[in-house]
Image: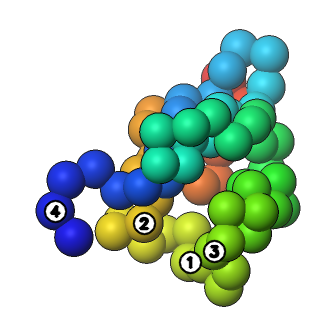
């Protein structure tokens, strides 16, 4: 798939959590993988690999970081 993946996980915020954008719309603030998977489920995506670069773009840090350093 060319271009930007449909799911963007933004860098950790200073207050904790990461903003999640799905197809250009803010889905919410995820504080961990379970939150992210719930946002994806609500958007119609299930059984998603969080390291799939065609689906998810991690900005700042990868899926192991959820709080600002």
The residue mark sitting in front, 3 or 1, is 3
Front: mark 2 or 3: 3
How many angstroms separate mark 4 from mark 1 (CA)? 18 Å
What residue is rendered at 64% in x and 54% in y?
64
Per the image, the residue denoted by label 3 is 45
Residue that carries the numbered disc 1 in the rendered image: 49
**Seen in the image, is 45 located left or right of residue 10?**
right
Label 2 SS: loop
If you read the primary sequence from the N terminus, does the residue marked by circle 1 or circle 2 appear first? 1
Q: Which mark is residue 2?
A: 4
Identify whether 45 is placed above or below 69: below
Q: Where is residue 19? Give x, y as percent.
A: 65, 33
Tell me, yes or no, if residue 26 can be seen here. Answer: yes
Give me the residue at 79% from left, 25% from top: 16
**Quick one: label 4 or label 2, which is nearer the N terminus?**
4
Find disc 2 in the rendering and name its residue: 55
Q: Earlier in the sequence, mark 2 or mark 3?
A: 3
Within 10 Å of disc 1 (Cα), the crowding (few <14, some 14-19, many 20+) is: few
Colour style of the rendered protein structure: rainbow
């Amino acid at each position: 798939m060319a271009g930007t993946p449909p799911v963007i996980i933004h860098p950790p915020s200073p207050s904790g959590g990461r903003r999640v954008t799905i197809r250009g719309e803010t889905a919410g603030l995820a504080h961990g993988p379970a939150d992210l998977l719930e946002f994806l489920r609500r958007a119609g995506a299930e059984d998603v690999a969080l390291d799939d670069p065609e689906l998810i773009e991690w900005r700042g840090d990868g899926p192991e970081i959820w709080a600002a350093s």
